[in-house]
Structures are given as C-alpha cells and as structure tokens.
Amino acid sequence: MLDFEPSEEQQLIVETVRQFAEQEIRPLAREADESGKLPDGLLAQAHELGLVAPALPEAQGGGGERSAVTSALIAEELAWGDLSLALAILSPGLVALPVVDYGTEAQQAELLPRYAGGSFVPGSLALQEPRFGADPFRPRTSAHRDDRDYVLDGAKCLVPWQEGDDTVLVFADEDGHPQGFLVPREAKGLRAEREQNMGIQALPTVELRLEGVRVPAEARLGGNEGSDLGALVTRGRVALAATAVGVARAAFEVARDYAKEREAFGVKIAQKQAIAFKLADMAIEIDAARLLAWEAAWRLDQGLPALREATLAYQQVRRVALEAADGAVQVFGGHGYIRDYLPELHLRNARGFAAFEALALV
Amino acid sequence: MLDFEPSEEQQLIVETVRQFAEQEIRPLAREADESGKLPDGLLAQAHELGLVAPALPEAQGGGGERSAVTSALIAEELAWGDLSLALAILSPGLVALPVVDYGTEAQQAELLPRYAGGSFVPGSLALQEPRFGADPFRPRTSAHRDDRDYVLDGAKCLVPWQEGDDTVLVFADEDGHPQGFLVPREAKGLRAEREQNMGIQALPTVELRLEGVRVPAEARLGGNEGSDLGALVTRGRVALAATAVGVARAAFEVARDYAKEREAFGVKIAQKQAIAFKLADMAIEIDAARLLAWEAAWRLDQGLPALREATLAYQQVRRVALEAADGAVQVFGGHGYIRDYLPELHLRNARGFAAFEALALV
Amino acid sequence: MPISFEMSETTRLARDHFRAMAVEHLRPISRKYDLQEHDLPTEWVDWYWKQGRKSIPGKAGESDGFIQVCVQTEELCWGDAGLYLRTPFAGLGGSAVGAAGTKEQKKRFLSVFQGDGPPAWGAMAITEANAGSDSAAIQTTATRDGDDWVLNGTKIFCTGGEGASQAEGGFVVVWATIDKSAGRGGIKAFVVPAGTEGMTLVGLENKLGIRASDTATLSFENCRVPSDNLLGSAEVRKKDQAKSSGDKGFKGAMATFDASRPIVAAMAVGVGRAALDYVLSELEHHGIELRYDAPPAEQTALERDAIDMEAELQAARLLTWRAASMMNRGRPNSLEASMAKAKAGLAVTRITQKAVELLGPRGYSKKLLVEKWLRDAKINDIYEGTQQINQLIVARRILDYPSSMLR
Amino acid sequence: MPISFEMSETTRLARDHFRAMAVEHLRPISRKYDLQEHDLPTEWVDWYWKQGRKSIPGKAGESDGFIQVCVQTEELCWGDAGLYLRTPFAGLGGSAVGAAGTKEQKKRFLSVFQGDGPPAWGAMAITEANAGSDSAAIQTTATRDGDDWVLNGTKIFCTGGEGASQAEGGFVVVWATIDKSAGRGGIKAFVVPAGTEGMTLVGLENKLGIRASDTATLSFENCRVPSDNLLGSAEVRKKDQAKSSGDKGFKGAMATFDASRPIVAAMAVGVGRAALDYVLSELEHHGIELRYDAPPAEQTALERDAIDMEAELQAARLLTWRAASMMNRGRPNSLEASMAKAKAGLAVTRITQKAVELLGPRGYSKKLLVEKWLRDAKINDIYEGTQQINQLIVARRILDYPSSMLR
C-alpha cells in the first residue's frame, strides 16, 4: 500500500542522525572546509552510531539490514550537517557495499569484517574520470588481462582518499565491459595527487593516474562473475540524490531562519513576497525531490530496475540543490557571499553534484 | 558607432504603425480569432500605409528602401496589435521578398508589380512540413526534374492562404538541395485543406498535399541560379522574432495595466512583489529580446552572415513571448482563462512560435 | 506501515478500470466537446450516471484510501479534464457538505448521488467579480428572515454551476456574509438546491480550455433557503477570535480545500500525463529511445526534455499522493495539499507547453489533442487557488506566519 | 544616428588593447590571488599604475563613449574580475565625486589618478550591518563641529576599502546622516581622504569569489573632515519634499548608480564570457560544432545549452550597451541601467554555473579557472543592488510607482 512515512524504527534512526548532524557535524563544517581537513575524532564518533555496518551481512559481523531507503534517510541527515563530512562518514560503503553485492566469498571474507569492526575504516572508489564528457557508465581507464594479472591504465578523479585504508576499488573497461578491481593504494604505477575542488574541500579526494598498474586476477571484483557498474551507478545516484536533498534542506532552513531575523524597510524580509515565495518554492521542490529519491531507493529494496527513477531523482535534485543554495545566497544578500555564513558553502557543495557519481552508495 | 535608437524616419514609421495597430487592429483581434476570419477591409487599409512595397525595387514600382531593421520595427508594432492580423498584413512579403532576392528578371517582372500596386495582394509560402522533427532547412517534399518540368511531391503545413492570389512559393528538395518553386494554386495534384490551429486562428492557413504537381522549369525560383533557403529561414527568424517581441509586449502591457487596476486584500495587485517582479522580469526580457532581434536584422542589412544571431534571437524570444503570455494569464487569474480578455489569446499565439518558420520575412 | 511506492491491488484494479473508461468513453468525444462549447456531453453524462459510477472493482477496505481517489481522478482527466468536470458528481459542493454538514444535511443533499433519479451535480460558488483570492471581500449577503436565509449577490467562475443550479436534485454551496463588519468571520456557506427561486444562471464563460465544463455566473436575488441549509453554525466570530474559533462552518468549508487540492492536483497530473504519454509514444514511433545512461556529451535535447518532463510529472504525482496519504492517516495536510497543487499546476503547464513545442507544427494543430491539453492544463495554475495563492499558503506555513504577516 | 551594432574603430582598438592586457597581465596571476586572499597583487597594481593606465589607443572623440568604458571593463573582467576591482582606480568613490562634486572637489580628489605618485584608490562606503538595500536606515552620523564634519559609525562591504582608506592619495566616499529624523533626505556623502585620523580598517571579508579584491569593514570614530569634503549641499530635505528636491548631494550620489550599474553589468558580462569562451573552446577542441540549423530532433543537449548561454550573454551585453548609449545621448537611464544590472547578474550566474556543469569533474576542479568564474560571477547578483533590488527599481519604473507604493 502506498505510504510515505518512515517506519518508527526509521524515525528513530533519523532522529539520532539528525541530532548528530546538528551537534557534531554542523559546528565543524566551516573550519573543515577552510582547512581542507577532516576534523579529528568525528569519524570514530560517527562509526559508533553504526551507519554503514548494519547494512553488511551478518556473516561478516554486520547487521544484515540492508535498506536503500534507510540509507537515503541517513544520507540526507548527514549531508544536512555538511556534505564533505557526510561523504567521509559514508565512505566505508564505497568499498563495502560493492563487495557485499558482487564480491567473491574470498573478497567478502577478507574485506567486510574490517567495516563491521570496532573502528572506522574509510573506503575509496575510483569511478569518475578527469575528461570532457566523462561518462560513469563507460570508463576509459582500461584493464587488460596479462597472464594471471590485470594491467590497468588511465586516470580517475574525485576519488575519496582518507587515511586509514589501503585499497581502492577502480572501475575500468575490460574488452568493452566495465569491471571493478580492488587495487592496493601502494601498487606500482599508481599515483595519487590531492585534488583541490570548488567544494567538498574537507573531504580528501585525489586524482589517480594509473600507468601499467598490475593486480592479480583475484583482484577483479566478483571474480569470474564480475560486477554490474550500471547497478552501482544507480545506487550511487540514489545516495547522492539523498545527500543533495540534505544540502538543499540545509540551505533552505538557513535561508528561512535568516529571512525571519533580518529586517529591511521596517519588516522582516521573510514578509516580502519575493523572499517568501522563493522559500516556498524551495520547500516544495525539496519535498518533491526527496520523494523521487525515496521512490528510487524503494525500488532498489524491492529488487526492481531503478536506473530510470534514480536518474530522474538525481537530475531533479541536482537542480533543486543548486537553486536552493543559490537562493539562500540571494536571501542573505551581501552576507551570502561571505565565508562567515553557510550559503556560499552550500552553493559550492551543491554545484558538485553536476560532477559527482558514486561518491556515496546505498 | 554603436547605437540603439531608431532613426527619426523610423520613429515616424513606428508611430504610424503603432497608431494603426492600436486603432484598427487591436479592436478586431478577438472577433477575428473567434470567427477564424480576417476582418473585411483591414488589409486594404494596411496596404495604404505602405508596409511592404517600400522594400521592393524601384524598377518594379517599389520604394527601393529594403531594411530588415525597419521591417522588424513594423512587424513588432503590427503583432502588438494582433499576431494573426499582422501575419496577414505582412504576407505579401512571403513571395515578394524571395522574388526580389532570388527571382529571375522574368519572375521579378511578372510578380513584383502586383505587390507594388494599388491593391493588397497576399502571399503564400510553403515551408514547414506536418511531421515530427520538421526541419525548415531540409524539406522532405521533393522536386524531380522531368524533361522541361519539375514534379513536386510531399506535404506542407502552416501555409498562409488568403484569398486574392494565385501563386504559392513551395520549397522542396532537389537532389539534396532545397529549392523554391512558384506553383499556381490551381495546379493539378495540389490539395489545400484549411487548418485549425490552437492560435493564429484569424489567419487562413492550409495544409498542402502535393501529389505529382507539375510545374515548368521556369517556375524554379531564381531559374538556374536557384535560391538560398538558409538565408530565407534566417530572414524568417528575424521577422518572427520581431513579431514575437510584439506579442510579448502586448501581453506585458495588458498585464501591467490590469495589475494597476485590480485590487486584492485592499491594495492594487501590482503592489505585490510577486506580481511586480514578474512584470519587471517580463520588461527586462522583452527589451533584451528586441535588441537581439535588431542585431540580427542589422546584420542582414549589412550583408553579414546572420543565421547565428537570428537563431539566438528567435530561440530567446520564443521563450520570452511564451513566458510573458503565460505570466499575463497568471496576473489576470481566473480572468486570464476567459476568452473575454486578451491573455489567453496571447498565450495561444505565443506558443505558435515553437512551430513557425518563415511565416513572415524581412 | 513502512515507506512504500507499491499500489494496493484494489487501487491498481480501479486505475485500470478508470483508464479503460477514459479510453472508451472520454477520448472519443474529447475534441467534439472542445468545439461544441456549452453543449451537454450527453453520451458521457448518461453513461456515467447509468453505469460508470457503479461497479468499481476491488475491495474498498484494501484500497490506498484517498490516494485511490487521486489515481481515479488522474485517469479520468488523462481522458479529458473538461468532461471530467462535467461529470454528474457531488463535486466541491459535495465536499463542503461532507466536511461541514450535519448528518442530516449529508443525507438530505448527498443521497441523490447514490439514487436512481436523473443525473445531478453539486458545485461551490465562492468567487465574485471583486473577490478573487480574497474571500474576506465577499459581497454576497445572507440575511435572516424568519426561518429562512435570503441570499443576494452574484457569483462568477462557478465550476459545474450550470448542472448544479439547473438539474433537479443538485445544489450549489454559496458563500455569503451574514455580517460584513466581521470580515472572514462573517462568511458562511449555504446549500441552495437546484431550481431554487431567485438563483439564476446568468451565463457560461467562454474559456481557453476545459470547454466541456460549465463555468457559470450565478446571480442570487432574494434567493430564499431554509435556515437548516446553513453549513455549520450561524455564530459570528470576530476577527480577533478567528484563531480560536471552533466554527465548523467557515473553517469546515475552508478545510474542503485541503481535501480537494490533492484531487485538483491529480487532475493536473492526468492532463500532464496525457501530453507526456503522447510525446513518448511519438518518440517510440520514430525509434527514439530515452537513454537514462546517455553519455553527457551525446544526450539529445529531446531526451533531456522528455526526461525532465517525466521527472516533473512524477514529482507532482508524488507530492499529490503524499498529501492524500496524510489524509489517510488523519493528519493535517494543508501545507502538503498546497504544495501539491502549486507544483502540479506549474509542472503540467510546463509539460504541456513543452509537448506542443516538441511536436512542432503537429503539436500546434487541432488534428492532435496535444494543443487542447495545453489549454486544459493551464486551468490548474489558476483555479482552486492560483499558483501564487498556493505559494502564499506554503510560505505562511513554512514561516509560521499568520496571514496578517504575509499577504 | 541609426540603429547600429558596429563598434567604432577606436572602441575596437581599445577592446583589443584591453583584451591583450587581460591575457598578459591578469590571467597569469588569476589563480594566485584567488588563493592568496588579501594579498596585494603588486605585479598588476604596479604595472597598471606605471603603464597600463596610459597609452590607450584610438581617438577619444571617435569612440562609442560610455559603451567603450563597458567594453574595456568587460575585457579586464574577462581577465579577472577580482583583480579588476583591485586596480588602482578612482572607482565608485570617483564616480560619486564626478557626479556630485564641485569643480574644485573634482580637482582636489581626482587629480591624483592622473598623477605620477604612488598608486591610489577610491571607494564608496554605504552599507551598514543593519542597512543593506535600505539606505534610509543608515546609522552612521555626521555632526557639524566648527568648520568640520565629524563622522561616527561602521561601514561594511566597502569594495576597494583597504586601498582607498590606507594608500596615500586615495579616499573613501562615506554616506552618513546629518539628520536622522529626515530619513533619506538627511543622508549626505563625505569624502574621507586615506589616512584620515579616526578612519580604521577593521578587517577584510573572506569571500566566495573575487578574492583578489579588498572588501573592507571601515570604522569611523570621531573622524573629522573639512566642511568642503561634503559632496553637494548640506541642506536637509524632509521626506515629503524629496521628490522636488534639487539637491545634488544625495540625488547626485544616487545618480552615480545609474552610471555605475552599466559598468557593473559589463563586469558581469566579462566573467560570463570567460566561462562561455572556455566551454566553446573545449567543444571545438573535441570537434563539436554548434549547429544553428540543427534538425530539431538531432540537436544535442550540449548544443542547446551552449546556444542558450550565448543568447543570454549577448542579451545581457546588449542591455548593458543600451543603458550606456543612453548616457551618450544624455538621456535618463535609471530603468535601463537596472535592467542591465539585473539581467547581467542573473545571466552570468546561470552561465558560469552551467559551464561548471558542462565540464563535469574538470569544471569543478581548481585546475581550471571555470570554478573560480562561477564564484566570481555570483557577486554580480548581489552587490550594487541585489537582483531583487534591481527588479524592484525596474518594477517601480514600469508601474510608475513611487517607492512608498512598492517596497
């Protein structure tokens, strides 16, 4: 039966994450962006909340409760706090979830327990490529079989690269089919250069160059079965749509609160139709985008095809998040342009969704 | 030197046409739309103003003062009065101007004097085609040479078809190149069916079927030299952009005046920011679109390539006219939906620019 | 219940049922009554009254509740929104009686719609020439005279007003003030049965679209109804008491908008889907497939437009269903209903305008219905609160402002 | 003169001259001073002061007048808008002196910009923490004391405020009220020379973009200037007289906005063109040609985006030039200047945001300047009147409403 209200259990999770985002993430967002560094201790704290591990199989110490809808709810709340920090907190899923979905028994046994353990272990997924017309479904980075090895060549960008892990999941084209490869960060021929981007500055990301990087055949995600990049991008779009809803909602709320405080010409600026209607539009579009994201997530949970729904949701919410952030800058006027206030940060982060793919997964 | 003010002579023309549009065209617009008929006498009256003849060569009795800019100024004013009636008034140019530009001496001598004469003679140009993805630059209607004749086959739509003329200029593909053919309306194999469209209901237009329509080789516009359809479409886009500016301005002015009259919650609705800002946006966009149209027209007058500028202008003003008309409906509220008021007529006409090509020329 | 996008079996059956009804009974006469403005679409009215309103499949208890009403509405309006509005329904007038009427009033006024008499209609009359969105400016008066209320005034834009005022069994719910000095607090709703002396059908509007529907001007001249035709209480709450008022009359009637806006939004979605479906079938016909994984540099403008249209339509639909599902849960949904209405009106205005554009000359021609859907769709940006009024309601709610702080 | 889109030879030469200057002197240090916020871009400042401001080609009398100023501004801001704003110019402060100052004042304050001393800057200080768009709310006071005016208050968002307040020879034009009870009528503009005691540079803002420019907070504590540093008359016009006021002071200073808005719009156009040029060169590099005659079903989304961007940019540029050309003719251009400013700010916000999108991950990276142009462009929607303020001005003009009727 059609219904659009999270379950009581989900509401409890949302409440917990919302509180964490408000009390622990949001206060650190500005400093983390300015310094380009993740705050000490935050990831360990987040890990204690158990945001990724519950989705992993019980056999590997997880909670066995994989739900894309629940993940979307969590992602929105975290991103409401701050996008960079949310992506950092969710990064374990970048490796753990594809391994759950496609990994061989050996890959699962080797990799999953670390994410279900007592300490935070980040994940790195290398999908996007630093070129014009970059196409997440058709990587140009190549993988050639050479005897018992694969040899990888190409370039990747927007690869999360936090300290504390040693593996990066690289997608490359193997004879016209994209496949994933679990590559040690220390592999010969792999060069990682820290990126500077307009936004998500607190999240360490790198541009990767792969020149004759050699990995054993066992490093191929899913072994002979391989993996499904299309499905992975779909899961990425749902996750990113949910985080974008979080960014949009953050921008909206900050703008709304400011508009109710700030006076001009003797009234609160929120009393001006131009401002009030802009806020109303934001609220409507955000709610609509959230429902689209939920629908795509729900389809994943049902095992239904979801590329279409995920793409609709992501395209809409990219626009919605950008408009909300841009609108918040306008509501703040001159203060919207200053790095003492959040709108400019939301704007820089929101525009990133035009470039992001699979920076988070559900 | 850069300058954006019509010359004194042009201002005088504009003033005259504006007065005609206000006093003679606008009052007839609604009735003409409802009845689907051109008002008696209007075309003769318009002819006396001399809106097309001055652009024809002096040798054929014209004024020898071809100016795309002046034509654009005239087109805007007429269309401000009513789009259907403006297109009817400008229709002689649909045949006369291509014949001026490309016609052989014989074609010019035969056809042009009628347009420079004492009575109104309409023109018919058959360019658009009734199919998905209709492409004005690449007609699918075909022309095959057969001995001393051409044989035309295909379908056309949105062909102005006023009473009082006997020729239609049909564009067709001849071995991969579009060419124009002067076809008698009475030609065998030519069937014309009166169209019903959402807007421009007062302008008689037809859908044409051409089945083995045979014309002599001399009917080919420009004889052996042929004609340049790309340039003609460019001239069409400039003319239509100017008429669209006229429609947009009409919608804007009607909405502005209504907003200053109508009260709600104790104030004029124009005092509400939501309305006032909408009107401001219309005004800005209309002025911008007009300047783009003028630039394209000016380039034509200078003999410079103008396809790019004409296309930019037309694409912009299509949007601007639709938004202005749609906005006017919103400003009028319930009355905007009623056929006693102009906004719904403007909306129906404005949307037509998505389908129009070369319904007028400069 | 968890978040679920799965339609119940019952609602799915109902959807298919109404879709078939739209295909068989509405589409074939869609253009006819667009052209024959003001003619009663007898084929549809008679068939619906005799058969259409009966035999809806599925088990009522297992439906998606109010969402099913939205689904059914979407299907019929996918068929033809003008004819939908001309259907013999209790309509908005019925909603008002349902929301604010006593048990006795409901029985008295609504049972005709279950009966086997001739077709009947209900309607609501609010708008006046000088009171559009501003209900406090209503000039129509109701004066107490003995056991009766006597109404005087003129109402415009009364959707379904011909049927409701003329066909026996139906009624018009008329908003009138019993105390001008009390502003909004003096406004009450009165049920005026069809044929009541003093209620005159002045005329029908010639409209841009939904031409099959009867948008009436009704005048009331010493139009007398019994006192128990007043919905709710006759007590007048003054302005400053309005907030704490428990008056089921005005507030109850206003609350009908919270219930009706999702329906109106669903109507919009139906019209928008008609246009989008046509565009998609045309693309398919020409071998153009929408690629949701198109390489960014290769996506066509057409593909992007079509995908945007799909997203906009689904966004409007989901907001609509969300507002309806809150009614299922008995939650206040004024904010969500206005969100759905605002989004749906705007979305289908854009979708239908885009559809005409994408289809070029054919889209503009009356040979197809696409141009009609553009004209029909636009009403959704206007009636039951314009785009702007719904934005205003949303803004007040999100800012937690009373109407005095944001007008 | 007829309508003409042909640039005069002189303006064309000047355009090429400034374009070369942008390529050689601004682009190479663009990223450097984006990263080194608050550092003085000495390479540029020194070179411009010693050489750049001299030797502009062409014959002054044969230029396109104010349009040429717009053209030059566009070129420099195509190079780098932040560095442009850090250029040793008389700036907005200079415009105010030019518009409202006496001959003596002009000579006294502006000759330094023609001289051979060290680089100097002019700036304007209007905004206060609680008076953004609302100049009537200005709290900074100017009190007459003997032959002096004594200023007290704090100004924020003063563009160029570091250079103008600190570097010898420059000045800040400060708006202050001499009579709070008079509202707008009591507000006057005072020239405060750099280094004047009591004027303190409190700090510089950390901004989204245009980081090379110095956006200052300045405080004035018993800051004393001679009485002849007041621009215009000291007479106070009360509110109801404001309309008929011939006071060159407030009105004159306000009029500088009519003159400066086309320049600001031209700045926006420069930034937008930088982004568009990059996108077009990238398309060319990948063999993608924009087809203005593409068959409707085959146009790519990229093509349409790029064509829209071109149209939006040219629309903004033409509105800008139109507003400037009215100044050439000596016509009032307040409406047209606000139109240009509003359109240009919005257009380049969209264009630069779109450019980042079209370039994907590379657009988002600091390896290219495109992301910087997005950040730089956004200021044009905000300063010199936000988008909303300019819409408001346009709305008042087209409705013929005084500000009291539309706020």
Image (cartoon, coloured by chain):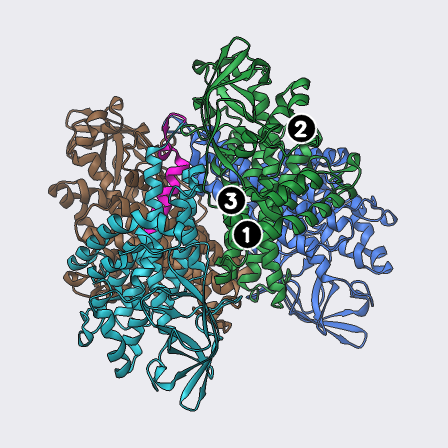
Chain colours: A blue, B cyan, C green, D brown
Q: Which mark is residue C31?
A: 1
The reply to whether dot 1 and dot 3 touch (C-beta < 8 Å) is no
Q: Where's the N terminus of chain A, which quadrant?
A: top right
Disc 2 to disc 3, C-alpha distance:
26 Å
Q: Which mark is residue C211?
A: 3
Please, what is the three-letter code of the amino acid marked with disc 3?
Arg
Q: Which residue is mark 2?
A: C112
Q: Are marks 1 and 3 on the same chain?
A: yes
| Letter of the chain that mark 2 sits on in the rendering | C
Residue D285 picture location, percent across and down? 48, 72
- Residue B196: % across, % down: 46, 58
Q: Secondary structure at mark 3?
A: loop
The foreground one among A310 and C39 is: C39
**Secondary structure under the numbered disc 1 in the rendered image:** helix
Q: Residue at x 27, y 73 (%)?
A: B303
**D52 or C178, which lies in front?**
C178
Q: Is residue A30 above or below residue B41?
A: above
- What residue range appears in magenta? B265-288
Q: Amino acid at mark 1?
A: Arg
Q: Residues within 10 Å of mark 1 (few under 14, many from 20)?
A: some
- Residue D242 placement: quadrant: top left
Of residues D276 and D199, the one nearer the viewer is D276
Instruction: Estimate the spatial distance between the alpha carbons at disc 1 and disc 3, rounded to whole Å.
Output: 10 Å
